[in-house]
Structures are given as structure tokens and as C-alpha cells.
Image (tube, helix red, strand yellow):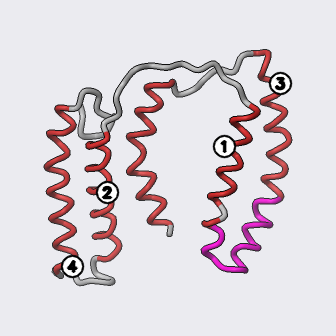
Amino acid sequence: MATGYLICMAATTPIWGKLGDLYGRKVVVPPRHSGRLIGLFGVMMPIAFIAGPLLGGLFADVGRRWAFFVNLPVGAAALLLIGAAVRLEPRRIRARIDYPGALLLTVVLVALSLVAGWGGTRYAWGSAPILALILVALVALAALLPVKRHAAEPATTPYTA
């Protein structure tokens, strides 16, 4: 489960970075709204500090996987609450996200993560599945480099200098 989270985080980092470039990394809340925002944090932090460990322990007792599945409705509720309570001045910039580059980067990361996780444990290092995953990672990486060079606005990755 943790590997899945790490793969998703690594694969989406260029997209989040690009969205940060497009919409700004940190919006400064106008002074007239900062009190309300600080009040929301003041109410939510004690609830999170108390309820988080208690509910986490409960879900761990019920079944370890429930601790992960509960994140989806809690995250959706948090997004709805933030969307309803926090009003920020929108800043729109016209730009493009490099979807082919993000997809190829995801393929590289997933293949390499599976090689690292399965190699020597589930499959022998020289087995067909491990060698196929290495080949997939190399092919996707070879395809990623020209895609990044020709993208109108490539996401910030180590592959673009």
C-alpha cells in the first residue's frame, strides 16, 4: 500500500509543480479574510490531533486497509469544506500541461518501483517479469526524453535542463 502512495506521489509531482507554476505556489490571503482562515485552523487542528490517532487505531483494529480507504471520503469532505469556506482571488494563466510526458514518467516510475519491490523476493533478478519491467522502464525513459524536449511547456523534472 505504501509503495502505491509513493508511486502516485512521484508520478504526479511534475503535474503539481506545473499547476503551481500556472496558478502560483502560495496565494496570500487578503487581510480581511485571514481571521476566518486562522479560526478554521484553530478549530480543526485540535479535532485532527485528537480524532486522527483515535480513528486510526480503530481502523487499524478493524482492518489495516481501512486506515487507507478512509482517506478518500475525509479528503473529499476537506476539499468541500475548504471550497466553501475559503475564498481566494483566482489567477488564471493560459498554459499547457505535458500529459504525454507525465504518462511516460509514470510508466518509468511504476516499472522501476516494481523491479525494486519484486526483484529478488517475488521473482528472481534474471526472471522474465523483472527483465520485461526493466525493458519497459528503459523504453519509456527513451521515449520520455524527446517528448520533454519537444513539449511546448514541459513539467519540471530532472530530464529538462
Location of mark 3 (residue): 35
**In terms of sequence position, does the residue under pointer 1 or pointer 3 come before the other?**
3
Magenta residues, start to end: 51-67
Q: Mark 4 or mark 3: which is in front?
A: 3
Location of mark 2 (residue): 109
Q: Residue at x 32, y 69 (%)?
A: 114
Q: CA distance from mark 2 to mark 3?
A: 42 Å
Horizontal and vertical percent for residue 28? 64, 20
**In terms of sequence position, does the residue under pointer 2 or pointer 3 come before the other?**
3
Q: Amino acid at mark 2?
A: Leu
**In terms of sequence position, does the residue under pointer 4 or pointer 1 come before the other?**
1
Q: Which mark is residue 79?
A: 1
Q: Amino acid at mark 4?
A: Trp
Horizontally, is 5 left or right of 154 in the view? Answer: right
Q: CA distance from mark 4 to mark 1?
A: 43 Å
Classed neighbour count for the residue bearing mark 2: other residues with Cα under 10 Å, few (<14), some (14–19), many (≥20): many
**In terms of sequence position, does the residue under pointer 2 or pointer 4 come before the other?**
2
Q: CA distance from mark 2 to mark 1?
A: 28 Å
Horizontal and vertical percent for residue 126? 16, 80
Q: Quadrant of residue 16?
A: top left
Q: CA distance from mark 2 to mark 4?
A: 18 Å
